[in-house]
Image (cartoon, grey):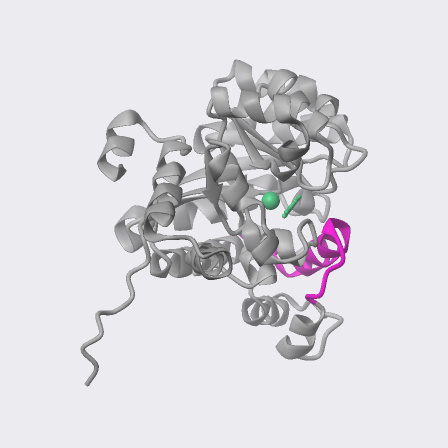
């Protein structure tokens, strides 16, 4: 009998999580079988061996290809249930979940199947998993501005289920300003706004996301460190940055976890949070990322508590709920 107290992950909010990036190989194969989709891999091990990325695009190619197995409302519900089960084990109490509707509508899947499937799982999440949730609909920045507008139109009947909009996919060459119009429409109907910026793209994309899109939170934001004036602004305005350490290593935005700029970002006074991005692909969920940075960067307990507190400070929570977490 062991008397060692069971490890308890610190309660936290997950603010940078692509639901499609939680598709584990086992579920991918199960859905492929059910939907009659043939995957170009014989086994889950063979698929896992393909998870060796050289940059963002090399990951995105596989990420979009594997989505072929997601076809029905039930599939999206199962995907979200599987994520929430894991998130609960990892101390996640609140999750703001990205989804990529264009990656599905382009394959003939109606946006209704995506949102209604996800919502079926999310609607019982607080009861079933003790996790409150929100949905953030992302536009694919490597698709056209017109395509973003079309999916925003298609999502009109479901906007009451959506807390905000985001911007993701291949960053370099697709600056935020390309999506000014659709973000203006999102703002006009009271949606929150976030955007990936400064993952592979330059610091100027972070400025543009703030100035042109009205982004309230920056996803990744790593490359702000190249622009001291921008860091000063992000610190002054306490703009949250949703950093994803394991993702950054796997997509080679940083060389090693031990060399991750997270401590420098904290020391600069930036409101940084630790998140998992695409945990099925990058080797870990929320607390796996917390434990990885604790080890690799020798973070003390106080710093880990600060990161957890930051996650609730950066979340789109009402002030009563936020206060209960802090
Ligand atoms: N889509 C899923 N994960 C992403 C990431 N890390 N960057 C950009 N787009 C993404
Ligand atoms: Zn991301």
Question: Is residue 324 rendered to the left or right of residue 255?
Answer: left
Looking at the image, residue 93 lies above or below residue 74: above
Q: Position of residue 151 (x, y in %)?
A: 65, 32
Figure quadrant, ligand 2? top right
Of residue 239 and residue 119, the one placed in the foreground of this image is: 239
Q: Mainly helix, strand or loop, the magenta region?
A: helix
Who's the residue at 67% across and 69% down the image? 36
Of residue 33 and residue 133, the one placed in the foreground of this image is: 133
Who's the residue at 40% across and 30% down the image? 316
Q: Is residue 105 magenta?
A: no
The answer to whether residue 115 is visible is no
Of residue 244 and residue 299, the one placed in the foreground of this image is: 299
Looking at the image, residue 112 lies above or below residue 51: above
Q: Position of residue 102 (x, y in %)?
A: 68, 40
Who's the residue at 59% across and 69% down the image? 25
Which of the 4 image quarters holds residue 140? top right
Question: Is residue 6 rendered to the left or right of residue 189?
Answer: left
Q: Is residue 58 magenta?
A: yes
Numbered range of the magenta stretch: 51-73
Q: Quadrant of the N terminus?
A: bottom left
Looking at the image, residue 90 lies above or below residue 147: below
Q: Position of residue 212 (x, y in %)?
A: 65, 17
């Amino acid at each position: 009998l062991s008397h060692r107290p069971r490890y308890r992950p610190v309660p936290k909010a997950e603010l940078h999580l692509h639901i499609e990036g939680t598709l584990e190989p086992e579920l991918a194969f199960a859905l492929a079988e059910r939907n009659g989709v043939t995957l170009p891999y014989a086994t889950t091990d063979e698929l896992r061996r393909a998870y060796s990325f050289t940059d963002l695009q090399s990951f995105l190619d596989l990420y979009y290809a594997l989505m072929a197995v997601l076809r029905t409302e039930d599939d999206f519900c199962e995907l979200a249930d599987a994520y929430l089960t894991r998130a609960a084990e990892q101390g996640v109490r609140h999750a703001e979940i990205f989804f990529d509707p264009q990656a599905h509508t382009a394959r003939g899947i109606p946006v209704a199947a995506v949102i209604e499937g996800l919502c079926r799982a999310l609607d019982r999440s607080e009861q079933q998993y003790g996790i409150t949730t929100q949905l953030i609909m992302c536009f694919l920045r490597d698709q056209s501005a017109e395509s973003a507008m079309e999916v925003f139109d298609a999502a009109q009947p479901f906007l009451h289920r959506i807390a905000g909009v985001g911007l993701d996919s291949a960053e370099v060459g697709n600056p935020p300003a390309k999506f000014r119009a659709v973000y203006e429409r999102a703002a006009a109907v009271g949606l929150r706004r976030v955007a990936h910026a400064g993952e592979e793209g330059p610091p100027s994309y972070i400025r543009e996301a703030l100035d042109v899109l009205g982004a309230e939170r920056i996803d990744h934001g790593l490359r702000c460190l190249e622009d001291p004036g921008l860091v000063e602004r992000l610190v002054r305005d306490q703009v949250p940055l949703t950093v994803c350490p394991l993702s950054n290593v796997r997509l080679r935005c940083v060389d090693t976890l031990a060399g991750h700029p997270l401590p420098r970002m904290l020391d600069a006074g930036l409101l940084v949070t630790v998140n998992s991005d695409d945990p099925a692909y990058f080797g870990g969920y929320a607390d796996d990322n917390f434990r990885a940075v604790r080890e690799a960067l020798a973070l003390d307990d106080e710093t880990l508590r600060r990161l957890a507190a930051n996650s609730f400070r950066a979340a789109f929570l009402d002030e009563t709920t936020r206060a209960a977490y802090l």
